[in-house]
Amino acid sequence: MIHAEQSAVVLLRNPFQPTQREVMVAHPGQTIRQWLGNQGIAEFDQPTVCIKNGTPVLRADWAVTPIDGVVLFITLPQGGGGGGGGGKNPLRTVLMIAVMVVATVYGGPLGASLGFSGNLATAVGSAIIMTAGSALVSALVPLPTPNMPSFAGSGGSLAQPSPTYSLQGQGNYARLAQPIPVVYGRHLVYPDLAATPYGEYQGNEQFLHQLHCIGLGEYDIEQIRIEDTPMSSFQEVTYQIVPPGSPVTLFNPDVVTAPEVAGQELLAGTWTGGFAINPADSEVTHIGIDILLPRGLYYANDAGGLDSRSASWKVEARAIDAEGDPLNDWFTLGNESLTAATTTPQRRTYRYPVAAGRYEVRATRLDGKDTNSRAGHEVRWGEARGYLAGGETFPDNVTLLAIRMRATDNLSQRSSRLINCIVTRKLPVWSAESGWSSTLATRSIAWAFADILRASYGAKLLDARIDLAALAQLDQVWAGRGDQFDGVFDQQVTVWEALTRVARCGRAVPFLQGGIVRLVRDEARSLPVALFSPRNIVKNSLKIQYVMPGEETADAVTVEFFSSRTWKPDEVTVSLPGS
């Protein structure tokens, strides 16, 4: 909830869907650039305009413009139809921009006419105009009907950029509804987020908890880095490599956060909340509360020193059902207090055990706030978290990476999302004498090919339907030549396409013969020969043509590849001698 005296920041990532905007509270005194930095936004990846209280603000002024009122960020839609077929209507775009302008200019007066005041009037009025305007535009210029998805492609969904092969997509993201990566050979990967990151305060220091998914299967972890720096250089970072089927012990990864709690000030005699901690059909066993004192806790005395001040508050909870109706009365989670004489912001996390269930929480301040300008006596409710019961819900065939980071000058919000690993896939190796071995770190083309055919995320074939003897023979050939497959499958592909990509690195192609998947390599072979002479050639049937190189004849070839030295796309040009 945004009160009239509070400042608000609105993120509108799609002006055609104003109901999906994000509204957040901004702390007093923050500039626009400071607020973006606290959110981990160094720069927007799409064209975005900033409007403060109806007036556009240039990027050059973001660092000196305070947030006092309503600041609106609007991401402008880009061209293209999302499938190569167009689909954008320029008239609809123009009309929606007109609606945004009207909402910015007339939102405040409309909200005031409805009885609201201050920033709340602007927010309410703008929301009403945007909702009504978008509905009118949709009625006049409806959205095009999407095409039916293709079962041969990606299911009709637009895949997110690969964090491995796309420079723009490199980073740690929660790629919802996207395939879990499968890595073969040796490769650098930016592991996806397997759970929502969360922070806690301990001793007035913030600790960030992130759980990453390296990929399906087992891996030999060669190095863990933050961007280009080995993680061993950061003393404030601890981590746990979680093999398939093992539990996460470094921290509890199953945590939900109440989005309604966003830095509200606690005042004596007024309850803030209740806010539902966890969604329906879930249970928490602990509730976490973050309390912030952004100005510290002190009183500046006449001698130029600091006298101590105390602040106290109370947190209550009650059980609710799936519909949000209370099941019993409020009960006390904790009566807390803090005494200090410091101008340093104070941050504390309090964790309370509860019986497994769904809860809502509320908080209030117990003592009166010292409003003297010489005192720092402000208490705010930073976050509310629920620690879920029931254990992890991750697949038992994935390798995870749990990281706990202490916020320091060495680590920023952006660098915490640039964690990457150099890994080598571990696969079983087959031989005619002993069959399948235990998993070993390997870059073999043959055993990556076999894994795609045998795995639960692949073709799920029995060994009898795979020409394992031929694979073992080819593996010796490739090992002698130094041919390897180092690749990551993090986008949806068919099994046959994956097999073709792997085999191509060994100059081979897969084929199906009698229900058995086989592999044949393009290589020199002994072929039958015959001698031709004028005695066995039909008269006038032999023709010889000499083709000489010309200006259009290529004398060099440029090959693009993914470099294992820089871990970026690279190219090499090879030319003929003397060209």
Image (cartoon, rainbow, N blue to C red):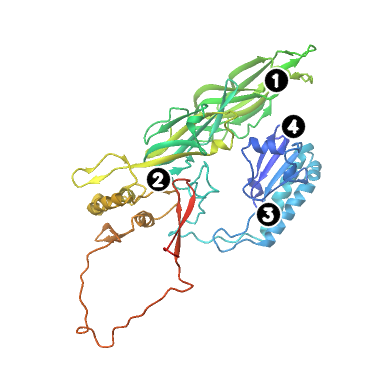
Q: Which residue shows up at 74% across the image and 32% down it?
A: 29
Q: Which residue is mark 3?
A: 135
Q: Which residue shows up at 67% across the image and 27% down it?
A: 272
Where is residue 4 drawn, in percent x and y? 76, 34
Where is residue 243 drawn, in percent x and y? 38, 35
Residue 346, quarter of the rendered image: top right
Q: Which mark is residue 343?
A: 1
How crowded is the residue under tag 3: few (<14 C-alpha within 10 Å), some, or many (20+)? some
Who is closer to the viewer here, 381 or 522? Answer: 522
- First of labels 4, 1 by sequence position: 4
- First of labels 2, 1 by sequence position: 2
- First of labels 4, 3 by sequence position: 4
Q: Is residue 568 above or below residue 367?
A: below
- Whether label 4 touches label 2, CB < 8 Å: no
Q: Is residue 211 left or right of residue 460?
A: right
Q: Secondary structure at mark 4?
A: loop
Q: Is residue 133 left or right of residue 319?
A: right
Disc 4 to disc 1, C-alpha distance: 16 Å
Q: Which residue is mark 2?
A: 183
Question: Given this view, does label 3 or label 1 mark the residue nearer the observer?
Answer: 1
Q: Which mark is residue 558?
A: none
